[in-house]
Image: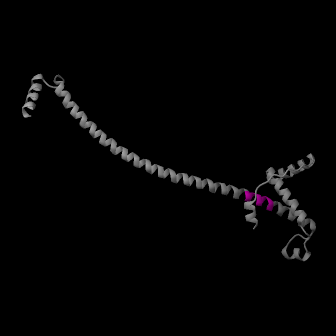
Amino acid sequence: MKNKELHNARSTTIKIKVTSETRKELEQLIHENQWTLEEGYRIILGAGMGYIQASPPKEEDLVRVGMPRTKKEMINRLVIMESLLASTRFRMFELQQANSRWELSTGAVFAENTSLKALLKEKDQQIHILQKELHGLQEELSKIQAVDHKESTILNPASTEKPNNFFRKIKSRLENK
């Protein structure tokens, strides 16, 4: 249940006023333990909650499970464990949020990739059709240019033939009709 609650939880900001001396002590403790500022504040807050919520254990229970025997030892251990637990919970929350964002972005990338592949296939088909059409137009152009060349030769015999040949061809064409 805690995992589900943590996954659905939202991060909120808490503002408190403390003396500058207390702030310095907090920051020094955080620095000594090499925590980030946020991580340190969460650990310290969690440790304080653990201390306040703790009830004194029975002596026989402590001996049986190998726990510290004095209240001070118990408090120290509880503070350490509670602080680690608070930090771990928040890190887990952050990682779950990051994972959720990653899954969403991965899904978007996959959908975009799929649509781009479909678009590419469609464009390839269009290119193939246009290439066929271009080939047909090039063949028609070649035919037209061949006919134009023949007609220009007839109309302008000086460019390719001697005048006698030109008139002979015209005469033979007229006779064949």
Q: Quadrant of the N terminus?
A: bottom right
Left/right placement of residue 176 relative to residue 24 reads left
Give the quadrant of the C terminus.
top left
Instruction: Give the vertical position of 57 relative to 26 (above or below).
Output: below
Q: Position of residue 87 (x, y in %)?
A: 79, 58
Task: Locate residue 130 relative to residue 173 in the image: left or right.
Answer: right
Q: Is residue 29 left or right of residue 96?
A: right
Residue 112: x, y in percent? 54, 51
Scheme by which the image is coloured:
one colour
Residue 53 forms part of the magenta stretch: no
**Residue 21 percent coordinates (x, y):** 93, 47
Is 90 part of what is drawn in magenta? yes
Secondary structure of the magenta portion, mostly?
helix
Q: Quarter of the image holding residue 45?
A: bottom right
Q: Quadrant of residue 73?
A: bottom right
Question: Which is more toward the observer, 146 or 82?
Answer: 146
As displayed, is residue 155 above or below residue 102?
A: above
Q: Residue at x 43, y 47 (%)?
A: 123
Magenta part of the chain: 85-93
Where's residue 108, x and y in %?
Answer: 59, 53
**Residue name at image x 91 percent, y 75 percent:** 59
User: Which is nearer the eye, 74 or 134?
Assistant: 134
Examine the image and state in which quarter residue 176 appears.
top left
Q: How many marks?
A: 0
Measuring 77% from the left and 60% from the top, which residue is drawn there?
89
**Residue farthest to the left?**
175
What residue lies at 59% left-to-right and 56% top-to-bottom?
107
Above or below, comparing residue 72 to residue 10 in the picture = below
- 83 or 31: which is nearer to us? 83
